[in-house]
Image (cartoon, rainbow, N blue to C red):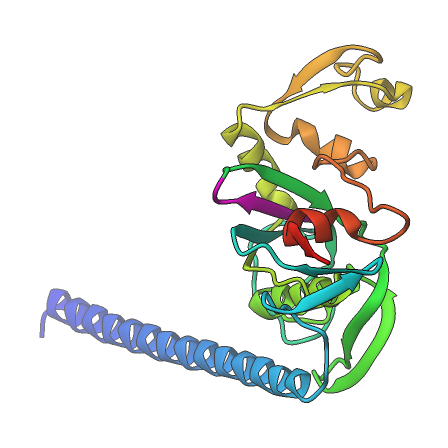
Amino acid sequence: MTENKKRQRWLAAILKIFVFAAVVGFVTFSVQSYQAKKEAEMMAEMRKSEREKTGFQTGDREAVRVYNGKEYRQNTLNTVILCVGVDTSGAVEQQKVSGAGGQADVMALLIQNRATDEVNILTIPRDTMTEIRLFDLNGNYLGTDVQHLNLAYGYGDGEQESCELLTEAVENLLGGVEIDGYVSVNMSAIPVLNDLVGGVTVTIDDPGMEERDPSLPYGETVTLHGNRQRPMCATGHQCFPERHFKNGSPQDLREGVDGASHE
């Protein structure tokens, strides 16, 4: 047998081993990924089942609510969307451990009247104290407790379950106002969203901003593009127009979302 044929046989054998190892590795990775996904889905389903056993005041569009002696019913012409900003960055991945998916730093209700196309935004402070559901690190339901609203997101999986837990807590906070849907993004979305709207124009009213960024001089009006808006949000500036609760209660939303009173 010539040296050339021996070399060809060795190369063929090595190639077969390489292909076999690649196939085994791919199958192993696929099986592990599938098992991890199924475990996360089972955990989410178990948590959902536990939540349904308790009597949280979730959204009910037909319910009549009493405020200051008047009865209110939710305006059926309004679409209510919960917008959530999460304090993580990078790709969003489903988590198995409570708290690993981050917390809700920004919460705002977008309320659109489909008849008039009028849109109002109600921001909800992240540190609002309200009743939320608690889970241990293994996903076991522990009951409810009055804690910061933003923590409700953290007890979920960092994806759909977190959004549902937070939505439920906001509905309960607002006396059962039904929220039609939700959207959540993390901090990596800030430059993308900022550029989609052509940047955000702001007036620098904090002298300390110029120390952080010389291109943000005090008293000047500037348009922020890309990731330049992020320091404004990180230092406590409102990233949404704010509408305050009246008399310490969410009357704005009950009048704005419910829209009609019945004596």
Query: Is any part of residue 22 visible from this angle?
Result: yes
The quadrant of the image that shows the C terminus is bottom right
Front residue of 219 and 88: 219
Horizontally, residue 8 falls left or right of residue 86, namely: left
Whether residue 112 is in magenta: the answer is yes
Asked where in the image residue 100 lies, by quadrant, the reply is bottom right
From the viewer's side, name the closer residue of 56 and 107: 56
User: Between residues 39 and 176, which one lies in front from this camera angle?
Assistant: 176
Which residue is at 55% across, 85% downward? 42
Frontmost residue, 113 versus 136: 113
* x and y, in percent, of residue 222 in the image: 69, 14
Q: Residue furthest front?
A: 263
| Quarter-of-image position of residue 99 | bottom right
Is 24 contained in the magenta span?
no
Q: Position of residue 31 (x, y in %)?
A: 42, 82
Residue at the far left in the pictured view: 1
Residue 29: % across, % down: 43, 75
Locate the N terminus by quadrant.
bottom left
Res 25 → quadrant: bottom left
**Residue 100 seen in the current view:** no
Residue 108: % across, % down: 68, 48
Secondary structure that dominates the magenta span: strand
**Residue drawn 31% across and 76% down?**
23
Residue stretch rendered in magenta on the structure: 108-115
